[in-house]
Each structure stands twice: as structure tokens, then as C-alpha cells.
DNA sequence: TAGATTGTTAATCGATTAACAATC
DNA sequence: TAGATTGTTAATCGATTAACAATC
């Protein structure tokens, strides 16, 4: 896999979607797929699919197409899902608990090692075996447990402060659900999930139709 | 507001972000903003901001800039947030409950009228005063309560079925959190929120740095 | 070999950025 | 009026699509 570091954001965002469709096909026993058939299923063009895959090297075979489980494995590796990733969740409220309860992430190598909160009523409890700790021990926990990713489920006004603390403790990536554009140094990966922006976009579309 | 129905998706997806920054400024007492200063705050170009706003008509004033609260109100109207929207949540599990507990949506006119589930242990309970109903009465509830939007928080394999039932009952928009690309007729608005795709993108970035 | 389908180059399309006249 | 900043047209850039030679 030759990873060209200038892969466009648009391509990167399609990778998980390819992965989802291909995993589904693999589960259903599909062995072989052409770019044309995949394009029909996914609602993309065959051209785009071939261009996308060729950003990472040629995974196909002329006259045949793509071998589904091989392609799956390639994309899994490209996405880094073949590696284990230790995760913590900051904020053990509704959303934090919902994410902790979702087991699908574990299947792809994301292991939730702990949750953190300021609320004394929550500290000490466990969700699906995942302990809720006092936010005070955040830094040492990150270092001691080789935590790579932090999920921010705190209220808006704590999000940047928590981000800064995690960054200082050497975290590699931040998945932010608070409604701010968290700021991180460029060697830390960041995804802002703005649910309200998705909702408002939907509202626009609904009123536009 | 002249609504050109061919506004590009890219522009539409920036509107909620403008709205967030402008609301924040309004709350902090900022009265006036130029495209240049807004571009600095948001990390966009001033040119793009002016182009975006001019898709919907001229909201600014030469030599002055934009009046924050006026612009806020315009975007609110463009997004349809000035209208009340009755919402139901399908699936009263962790994610459904987390969304029901979030009060921010109500503030923008989204009123959650009920939740639905198949689980007899959940039916009859209430979350923040929002009743959980048997999924069997879904159709009549939608009609009787003028429900415009359905939020899907069910497991993957129920999502399309539930979508179809809501569409048949005349729902106008679907906010789908299940990991499938739900299919709807073109007169129904749809937003698929694929949390795992966001996570995998983050995983890619983290491993790419 | 013939047919199918990729990998890749070229053409097109659309989105972003730059520039500047209009005007507050 | 002079300065500032928009609205809008033109230029650039990048992403998508089309085409086709390579090859399984």
C-alpha cells in the first residue's frame, strides 16, 4: 500500500462507505465485484470507484474485477482498522453512555478503556463493564493505558479545555461531539461531529422540497 | 429570500456552521461583522462567504459589512428553523434516549412528540416527559400529530422497514442514524448520519499523520 | 483467442478564489 | 468626500467523468 499523503478529503470520506458495502457483500458470500456493479449498488460512477482505489494502488484484475474479501482487507488496512486503538470517552452523560454501549466499534479494533466525568454520582459506576473515572486522573490514565483516541461528549463549554488536556498528554486523535470546532495541533487528528448541523441541513432540505 | 433550488450541497452544508458562529457572536453582543473578519474566525475565505450569502440574496451593506442579528435571522429562516417541526424518534435505546434528552433541538423548533419501540419493557416509560409508544401505532400517531420528521435509532435491520412505514404515513423528512443508506422517494428529505464512517475517517487520519 | 474490465490519461464540470466596479 | 466592504464577474483550481489502451 503506497500511501500518498495528498489523498483528497473527498476520497478519504468515501473509503468507509466502500468498506461498509464490501463488508456487507463479503458477509453475503459475494466473491467478485466489478467497478460497474459496485457503482450501481452504491450510487457512484464506476470511473470514480476505479480512480479512488487507484489512489492506493491497483487492487483489481483486468477482465475480472475486484476480489471482495481482498479489497475489504485492503481498505481495512488503509483505514487502520487492522490495528488496536485504545479509546476513552470524556463525559458520561447520555451520548457518552450511548457510544459506550455500542459494541460495533470494538469489533473494528476500538477498545474503550474508560469514561470520565466530573459528576460524583457517575464516578465509580460502570457501563457495560467500562469504568467511569474522575476527570482529575485524565492525564495519568492516558499515559498509563496507552490511550490513542479521546471522544468528547461533554457540554460545549468544557470541550476545548478537555481537548487541550488530552493533547498535552499525548493523545493522537479526537472525536468531538460537542458543538464547537475544537482546535488541535496539526499532528493530532480531529473529527468534529456536529449533529445539529446535520439536523439543520435536513431541515433546509425538507423545507426546500 | 429567493430560494434557487439549485443551491449546491456544499453551500447548504456550510449554512448551519455560519448559523452557529453568528448565533455565538450575537450572544456575545457583536453587532457588525465583515466577510473578512468572519472568514478569519471560521477558517474560510471572505470570497466564499460572500458567494455563499449571495446565493440567497444580498444581506450585507457595502462599506459596512453584515448586521449580525439580521443575518442570523435570515439564515434561521433559510434553514427553516423559524418554523415548528414535530418529530418522533424510532428506537428508544441508548442513542434514541440521548437524542430525546438533548434540549438544544427544542430551542430551534424541533418538538419531540413521542418515541417508539418494540421492547415491552420500554413501552409506557417516558424520557424527559416524552412518552415511549408501541411501534404498532406508528402510522396513526404520525397522522394524528402532524409529524414532519422521523429520527431512526433502530438497529440496522429494521431501519428500511421503519423508513417505508413513515414515508407511507406522509412523513416529510428522515434523520437516519442506522448504518444503512436509507432509501426514500425524492419528495422526502433524508440525512444519513453514519457515525462509524466518521470514526473510520478519523482512524485513517490518525494513522496517516 | 475473444470478451471483459481494469488502470490511467484526457476532457469536462463545478466549486473556490481573485479581482474590481458599485455603493454605502 | 474618502475609506471600507459588498455583490458579482472572471480566473483558477480540483474533482468527477469519459475514453481507451493494457491485460487478465
Image: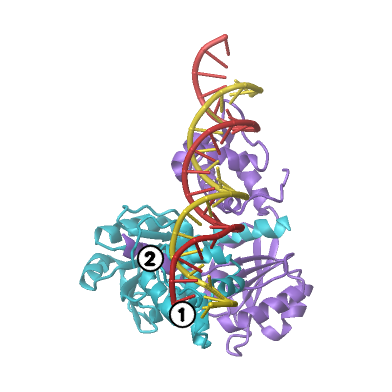
Chain colours: A purple, B cyan, C red, D yellow
* Residue at image point 52% right, 76% down: B21
Q: Secondary structure at mark 2?
A: helix
Q: Is residue B140 rendered to the left or right of residue A105?
A: left
C-alpha span from label 1 to label 2: 22 Å
Q: Position of residue A47 (x, y in %)?
A: 53, 37
**Tags 1 and 2 on a common chain:** no
Image quadrant assignment for residue B158: bottom left
In the picture, the quarter occupied by the N terminus of chain B is bottom left
* Residue at image point 55% right, 63% down: B47
Q: Residue furthest bottom?
A: A120
Q: Position of residue A160 (x, y in %)?
A: 64, 79
User: The disc numbered 1 marks a residue on which chain?
Assistant: B
User: The disc numbered 2 marks a residue on which chain?
Assistant: A
- In front here: D7 or B45? D7
Label 2 belongs to which residue? A204
Label 1 crowd (10 A; few <14 / some 14-19 / many >=20): some
- In front here: B62 or A135? B62
Label 1 belongs to which residue? B67
Q: Position of residue B155 (x, y in %)?
A: 44, 61
* Residue at image point 66% right, 56% down: B204
Give the label, 1 or 2, closer to the camera.
1
Q: In the rendered structure, find residue B112 and report the number of the disc placed on it.
A: none
Amino acid at each position: 500500500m503506497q500511501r500518498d499523503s495528498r489523498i483528497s478529503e473527498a476520497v478519504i470520506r468515501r473509503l468507509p462507505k466502500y468498506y461498509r458495502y464490501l463488508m456487507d457483500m463479503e458477509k453475503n458470500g459475494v466473491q467478485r465485484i466489478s467497478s460497474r456493479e459496485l457503482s450501481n449498488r452504491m450510487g457512484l460512477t464506476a470511473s470514480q470507484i476505479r480512480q479512488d482505489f487507484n489512489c492506493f494502488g491497483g487492487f483489481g484484475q483486468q477482465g475480472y474485477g475486484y476480489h471482495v474479501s481482498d479489497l475489504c482487507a485492503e481498505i481495512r488496512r488503509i483505514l487502520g482498522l487492522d490495528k488496536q486503538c485504545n479509546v476513552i470517552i470524556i463525559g458520561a452523560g447520555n451520548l457518552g453512555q450511548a457510544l459506550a454501549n455500542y459494541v460495533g466499534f470494538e469489533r473494528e479494533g476500538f477498545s474503550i478503556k474508560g469514561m470520565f466525568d466530573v459528576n460524583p454520582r457517575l464516578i465509580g459506576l460502570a457501563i457495560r463493564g467500562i469504568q467511569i473515572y474522575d476527570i482529575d486522573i485524565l492525564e495519568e490514565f492516558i499515559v498509563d493505558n496507552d490511550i490513542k483516541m479521546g471522544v468528547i461528549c461533554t457540554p460545549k463549554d468544557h470541550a476545548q479545555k478537555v481537548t487541550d488536556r488530552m493533547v498535552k498528554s499525548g493523545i493522537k486523535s479526537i472525536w468531538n461531539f460537542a458543538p464547537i470546532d475544537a482546535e488541535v495541533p496539526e499532528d493530532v487528528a480531529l473529527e468534529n461531529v456536529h449533529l445539529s448541523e446535520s439536523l439543520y441541513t435536513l431541515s433546509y432540505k425538507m423545507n426546500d422540497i
